[in-house]
């Protein structure tokens, strides 16, 4: 492929860096990704360009094989967004090229939708296909009871990131109470409608992270232990103040008593900017 002067070879030789951007896809849940990484690592070596990864979550990995460790060691930089992933690399001797960092969304401020003068709202963002062996009818009943309890915001909204997964919960909740839905197209065009004073209940890592950065208090729901609990814990470690749904029991929630998020976004954005500078300066 590299030998083709007027085809792929010419295009590939213009590459200055291979950058694996942040995400939770390099782990045991998606084993085929390691094959793609091996191909990219080989191309990077043949071209003499850096191979970097930023904002990565590497768990779950049940066993780090010698081949897997050797592949990860070929990276010039591996920035992990959670401590467990970084500790995994250190335990397997991949410390010189790795660092503990944050998610790639810290490259920018959170894009917030234009705000009107409204009372606090409660936002839901739940993935039906990521709930594991959870008793779904009982879970929906519990959510409905919470929405109806005194002191909860009356303005209920649903953030639909992925309709194929979110529509089931949205339909279930909408059948029991009035819900305003924000679809993905609107969110991408306008930004996240969450703000200080709102409350968010989400199973998604990025909804947790971005909503907390905007000042919303909330609760996260872990659907797949070993994967999403690591993601959510990393946001809690940054200072989100959110609680794990499964630790709260059946008592009513007193939202006024809950801690407000204290994520140091400005500091973490500056830290992320330094990582970006390092990535760009390493390129030939």
Image (spheres, rainbow, N blue to C red):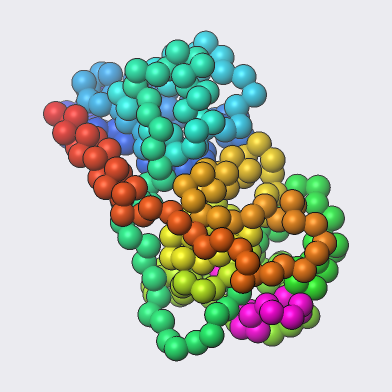
Q: Is residue 66 left or right of residue 132?
A: left
- Quadrant in the rendering for residue 181: bottom right
Q: Is residue 36 left or right of residue 62?
A: left
Q: Residue furthest bottom?
A: 117
**Residue occupying the point 46% across, 43% down:** 23
**Residue occupying the point 29% across, 43% down:** 271
Image spot of residue 97 (x, y percent): 34, 21
Q: Which residues are magenta?
A: 147-160
Q: Residue furthest left?
A: 284
**Residue occupying the point 61% across, 83% down:** 155
Q: Is residue 148 magenta?
A: yes
The reply to whether residue 13 is in sight is no
274 or 6, nearer to the observer: 274
157 or 15, nearer to the observer: 157
Image spot of residue 276 (x, y percent): 25, 41
Q: Is residue 103 magenta?
A: no
Image spot of residue 219 (x, y percent): 63, 59
- Quadrant in the rendering for residue 49: top left
Q: Is residue 182 above or below residue 74?
A: below
């Amino acid at each position: 492929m590299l030998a083709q002067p007027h085809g792929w070879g010419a295009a590939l030789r213009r590459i200055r860096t291979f950058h694996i951007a942040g995400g939770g896809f390099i782990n045991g849940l998606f084993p085929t990704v390691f094959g793609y990484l091996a191909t990219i690592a080989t191309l990077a070596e043949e071209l003499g360009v850096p191979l970097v990864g930023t904002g990565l979550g590497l768990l779950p990995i049940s066993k780090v094989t010698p081949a897997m460790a050797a592949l990860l060691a070929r990276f010039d930089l591996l920035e992990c967004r959670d401590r467990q992933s970084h500790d995994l690399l250190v335990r397997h001797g991949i410390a010189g090229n790795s660092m503990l960092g944050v998610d790639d969304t810290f490259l920018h401020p959170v894009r917030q939708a234009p705000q009107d003068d409204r009372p606090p709202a409660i936002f839901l963002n739940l993935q039906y296909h990521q709930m594991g062996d959870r008793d779904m009818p009982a879970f929906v009943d519990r959510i409905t009871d919470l929405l109806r309890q005194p002191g909860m915001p009356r303005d209920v909204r649903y953030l639909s990131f992925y309709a194929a997964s979110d529509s089931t919960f949205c339909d279930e909740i909408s059948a029991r109470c009035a819900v305003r839905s924000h679809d993905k197209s609107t969110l991408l065009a306008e930004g996240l409608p969450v703000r200080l004073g709102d409350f968010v209940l989400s199973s998604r890592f990025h909804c947790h992270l971005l909503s907390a950065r905007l000042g919303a208090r909330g609760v996260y729901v872990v659907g797949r232990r070993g994967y999403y609990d690591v993601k959510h814990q990393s946001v809690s470690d940054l200072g989100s103040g959110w609680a794990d749904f499964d630790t709260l029991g059946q008592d009513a929630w007193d939202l006024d008593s809950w801690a407000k998020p204290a994520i140091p976004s400005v500091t973490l954005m500056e830290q992320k900017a330094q990582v970006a500078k390092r990535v760009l300066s390493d390129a030939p």
